[in-house]
Amino acid sequence: MESGWLPKTWLRTRRYLKLSTSEVDLDSDVKHFPEESRRTSLFWRAAPWIINLMLLSLSGAFLLQAIRIRQQVLGPLLTREYETASRECGSKKPLELSGEFGVRSIWRGEPNAAVDAAWDSLDLTSAMTVSRDEIERVGKLRNSSVILDSGGYMASLGAFHQMHCLNVLRKYTYLDYYIVKEPEFFRTPTVRKHTDHCIEMLRQLLMCSADLHLITYDWVDGVDHPWPDFSTNQFCRNYEDVHAWGKAHVVKSNYSGGLIPKPKNAITRKLPPD
Ligand SMILES: *[C@@H]1O[C@H](CO)[C@@H](O)[C@H](O)[C@H]1NC(C)=O
Ligand SMILES: *[C@@H]1O[C@H](CO)[C@@H](O)[C@H](O)[C@H]1NC(C)=O
């Protein structure tokens, strides 16, 4: 007779079951239930609500945990690059790093005017400015942030500081030469602190990127042990493009090297002790 849909059948069955108890006076039946079994039946009626509530609190707990993990990853230590630069400096492209042991290049060897000019062309210590929104997005908006007269917050890119650091270390390995050429830096007592700071920055950066490219080994003429091939195929930014972008964004200022006098009413940030 019933050719319908399953839930309808189910409802019908339920109604049928109910009808089957119609002979019994339900009210008196309940009255005759012992107290405990009345509580048990109340429990079973409440059970779906209790289970729902438990599931709701569980998913709420998961949501809070997810938000907490996200905040641990993204903030307050935001891990964002400066978006404008990363958008405008061009995408990363394949590049083979030149790793031959004795390879000649303009960047290496005994210092002279040509080597210095090459390294100087990579350096860019001048400041640029970023907007309030931009400094906030990298999690570095502070009440002690330096705002320049030209408007905007003083900033510079990590790549330029790192290149500057490498250059300082290079020069330090040729101290005899640079102590004469740049005594205003290499004769000061703070030069040791600068070089140690640079080593520490580059250590962290190298550990952070932890290069997993393969160094392979060959047999080579005149050497009886395996010879490493340090030339790895990487995915790199075009540093010249980044440098050109940085140069185009340098703030024109009468104060070279960011040596802007501190305003009298400046809010300051405490530095950790040495
Ligand atoms: C500046 O910010 C720091 C860190 O949030 C805070 O401890 C300090 O009280 C603030 N100083 C002023 C003058 O607002
Ligand atoms: C830099 O100094 C010159 C001359 O003293 C002045 O005319 C100019 O406004 C200054 N520029 C800035 C950005 O302060």
Image (spheres, rainbow, N blue to C red):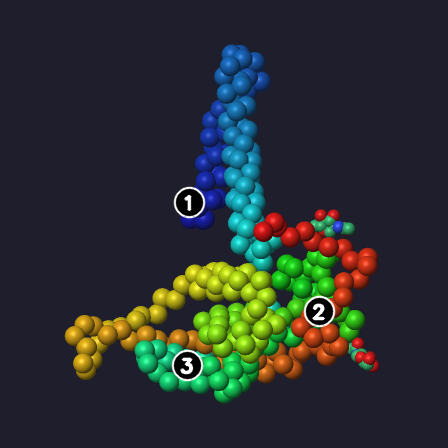
Q: Which residue is mark 3?
A: 109
Which amino acid does the dot numbered 1 rest on?
Answer: Met
Location of residue 206 in the rendering, given as x and y in whole percent from the top left corner? 44, 64
Which disc is residue 255 wearing? none
Location of residue 191 in the rendering, given as x and y in whole percent from the top left corner? 55, 65
Q: Which residue is mark 1?
A: 1
State how far apart marks 3 and 1 are (Cα): 98 Å
| Cβ at disc 3 under 8 Å from ligand 2 | no
Q: Secondary structure at mark 3?
A: loop
Tell me if residue 64 comes above or below residue 46 in the rendering: below
Work out which residue is located at the far bottom of the displayed protein and give it: 114
State how far apart marks 1 and 2 are (Cα): 94 Å
Left or right: residue 212 versus residue 120 is left
Q: Is residue 264 visible?
A: yes
Q: Secondary structure at mark 2?
A: loop
Earlier residue among tags 3 and 1: 1
Q: Which quadrant of the view contains residue 263? A: bottom right
Q: Which residue is mark 2?
A: 259
Q: Which quadrant of the view contains residue 133? A: bottom right
Disc 1 vs disc 2: which is toward the camera? 2
| Cβ at disc 1 under 8 Å from ligand 1 | no
Left or right: residue 214 versus residue 220 is right
Q: Residue at x 71, y 61 (%)?
A: 145
Q: Residue at x 58, y 62 (%)?
A: 190
Which amino acid does the dot numbered 2 rest on?
Answer: Leu
Task: Categorize mark 3 by other alpha carbons within 10 Å: few (<14), some (14-19), many (20+).
Answer: few
Which amino acid does the dot numbered 3 rest on?
Answer: Gly
Disc 3 vs disc 1: which is toward the camera? 3
Q: Residue at x 32, y 78 (%)?
A: 101
State how far apart marks 3 and 2 are (Cα): 33 Å
**Front-lying residue, 213 or 40:** 213
